[in-house]
Image: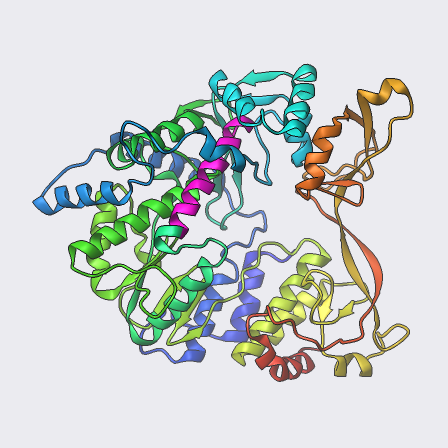
Amino acid sequence: MYSRTAMESFLHDDLGSLPPYLTSDMDLATARKVSLSKSLLKKYLDGSSAGADQRALQKFLDCNKRCSEYRLCFDTSWDAEFVGRLSEELNITGNGPTLDLDLSKLKDDLGLGPGANVGSQSYNFYTKLYDSKLTLTHKHLAQLYRAAIFDHPTRRNAEMLRFLVHGDRIVEGSRLSFVPKTYEISRTICTEPTVNMLFQKALGEYISRWLMRVYGIDFTRQQDVNRRMALEGSMNGKFATIDLESASDSISMSLCDYVLPRSLTSWLNMSRSPVTILPDGGRVPLDMISSMGNAFTFPLQTLIFSAAVSTVYRMMDIKPCGLPGPKRNFSVFGDDIIVLKETYETVTRYLGFLGFRVNKEKSFNSGHFRESCGEDYYRGHNIRGVYLTSLRTPSDIYSALNRLSRWSAKTGIVLPQLFSKLKLKLRKKIFLIPFQFGDDQGLKVPLSYVQASKLVIGKKHSFYALQARPYTVKLQQPSTSRDSVTLGLEYSNKLITRQGRQSSKRSSRVLYNADGLLNSFVGGFIREGKILLRSDAVTYQTRRYSCPNWDFVPMESHGFRAHFDCWEAVMTTYL
């Protein structure tokens, strides 16, 4: 794998000397080059970075300290009015004698995310919920969980059998770990106890439905909404984009007590982790209501920021509208916030008043640049660069080459030095594949090039490509009557460690929970008689494919169909 210094040298040879930052008077081609120079190696991990985890931990602890010290402080009468109106805006459950939010509103949305849970033996849904100890922070959650599933016979029976074999385990809270974010700093993730996560997921769904009903915020489509508004803001300056620093870790317990309804905060407090355990075994009491890894964090922050924007609008005599249509004047997706230009200063002031910090480097109210939901717009054009994370495997290199070639086709800027150096890393025969296949499966080239190439194998539409090999558990029938209680679920692949070394094949006997298997099947977690496992390591195998429509460009390719001719010219230059 090339070092960062080598990669910077290759890029400099292609792009030349560039200004360090975007400016409003910059031409489009230069802006695109600057964007690529800033993005390409931002997340590139070549092993030379030191202290990324420690910096992430310190940032997490700083956020937790700020949450512990946060108190509402009214400097003006407008501040008191803002808090009062915000509390009314956030009254999503009711605070009368009969509280609206109870177990009946949550029980149908109990669920788990794709990641790990404290105490689970594996990542897959079946093992986490039906073949592991269920972990929880206090016993009342177990009682609530069993009451919630009592009317579902298969879920109830599956839990009865699991409890007889494994039981429950009370834990202090979540466990903190690190995942890569950028070259300089990692990202902190808190792995939650299983039963806590079930209720966190349900609370997140409850909040999401309210957001959809009141503000028109649909998480399945909201990113596209943000991007369209950011695009418009870069053209006419109508909208400003706001990004917050560590928003997931900055919602303080005090703020929730001040502005959220009692019935909601009681459920949030019951399902949250009051403590997180650090990698070194240290114990940190949490003054933040939740962290990244908690299933209600994202909906909750979207709720608070949407209500804050709506409250500011009303105080400024602007009618807030987040519903679809030409009158939409704000949008929120997590900590990606878009508001009218004239409200930017007031909105950012009151976000600070609530204990959040605006990321000045990623928030824009002037000039022609806007950034939101992973897209960068300059004067109405998407100038988003390419982000490389690793070049350790052929699939990594194929992915990098394909993304760089598409970037060149869209921008008209070729990168011959960088492309050729990356291609040299593919020492074996290069797999040429159609556009509609995955970026990590081979090098995407137009059919006109394939027909003239000696690398074509067999028919003109026949080719070889890499195929990801998922880690699965095979379901096997019991061989004897004794196996009606326990059944061997045999791991069909060789186990891979984080370092990629193979260990010997082994069999793992786990609980045969027929009702649990049925629930997993209905939920889509079992396909073709196998349970998919999540793993940090992925293996690839070579497979032969055939394709009758090589140059077909899928509609979801973000407008690349219009650049197809340019892509053909770019690939001819590169190859």
Say whether residue 331 is left or right of residue 222. left
Residue 195 placement: quadrant: top right
Please indicate, yes or no, whether residue 273 appears anywhere in the rendered image. no
| Residue 540 x %, y % | 77, 52
Q: Residue at x 34, y 76 (%)?
A: 235
Quadrant position of the C terminus in the picture: bottom right
Which of the two residues, 315 or 465, is positioned nearer the viewer here?
315
Give percent across and percent down for residue 422.
66, 65
Q: Is residue 127 visible?
A: yes
Residue 515 horizontal side relative to residue 62, left or right: right
Q: Residue furthest left?
A: 77
Q: Nearer the viewer, residue 323 or 288?
A: 323
Q: Which residues are magenta?
A: 192-212
Residue found 31% across the figure and 34% down from its top: 252
Q: How many marks?
A: 0
- Residue 201 is covered by the magenta coloring: yes
Is 353 left or right of 143, judged from the image as shown? left
Q: Position of residue 547 (x, y in %)?
A: 80, 71
User: Which residue is pictured at 58% across the width and 78% down the height?
Assistant: 409
Residue drawn at point x = 72 percent, y = 40 percent: 521
55, 321: nearer the viewer: 321
> Percent position (x, y) of residue 293?
49, 38
- Give the main secondary structure of the magenta stretch: helix
Question: How has the structure been colored for display?
Answer: rainbow
| Position above or below: 406 against 486 | below
Which image quadrant: the N terminus?
bottom right
